Amino acid sequence: MIHMRFYVGSDHAGFRTKEALKKALGKKGIKTIDVGTFSDESADYPDFALKVAKKVARDKGSLGLLVCGTGIGMSMAANKVKGIRAANPFDAYTARVAREHNDANVLCLGGRTYGAAAAKRILAAFLKARPSADKRHRRRVVKIMEIEGKC
Ligand code: RB5
């Protein structure tokens, strides 16, 4: 069992992909806490983005996974929550760099933009990567977070 808390959520468009990714995380021994939605009945993505983002912001060291049709609305909504750096990568490379360079703590994926196999590859790359200790990257992440205090 990997000791990592992964808060997950989706709207109806991301529901099936969320379920597939939860299984993939379970196979890796990663505990998921699912905030919904729990069916493919129409649901509003900001509601689930807010739930996951608040939990990740309060639980140091945890990560979040949000799935909507494209991952775009989820990332916009999650990034409104203080302490959240939500990324919407489109392949394994951008997922790795989102962790290494941007210290992303929420991964947003699209249930309608690529298949479950691609979503699993993106998630695996995100999981494997670690935030870089390189001073340049840390400085830039600190600058991102300072924007919260200025607005
Ligand atoms: C729902 O139809 C769709 O708009 C939503 O899942 C998402 O793609 C928004 O960004």
Image (spheres, grey):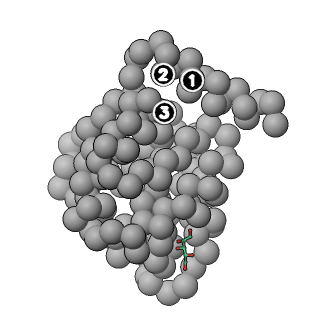
The Cα–Cα distance between marks 2 and 1, rounded to whole angstroms, is 5 Å
Q: Is residue 82 left or right of residue 113?
A: right
Neighbour tally class for label 1: few under 14, some 14-19, many 20 plus, Cα within 10 Å:
few
Quarter containing the N terminus: top left
Question: Who's the residue at 33% across and 68% down the image?
Answer: 114
Q: Quadrant of ligand 1?
A: bottom right
Judging by the rendered image, the residue that carries numbered circle 2 is 137
Of label 3 and label 2, which has the lower sequence position?
A: 3
Q: Residue furthest bottom?
A: 41
Whether pointer 3 and pointer 2 mark residues with C-beta atoms closer than 8 Å, the reply is yes
Residue 81: percent from the left, percent from the top?
66, 46
| Direction from residue 2 to residue 33 in the image, left or right | right
Q: Which mark is residue 102?
A: 3
Would you say 33 lies left or right of 125 here? right
- The three-letter code of the residue at mark 2 reads His
Q: Residues within 10 Å of mark 2 (few under 14, many from 20)?
A: some
Q: Are marks 3 and 1 in contact (CB under 8 Å)?
A: yes
Q: Position of residue 112 (x, y in %)?
A: 40, 74
What amino acid is at disc 1?
A: Arg
Instruction: Say whether residue 33 is visible.
Output: no
CA–CA distance in space, label 3 to label 2: 7 Å
Q: Which residue is mark 1?
A: 140
* Residue that lies at the very extreme toward the top in this rendered image: 135
Q: Is mark 1 within 8 Å of ligand 1?
A: no
Earlier residue among tags 3 and 1: 3
Q: Give the residue drawn at x 63%, y 65%.
A: 46
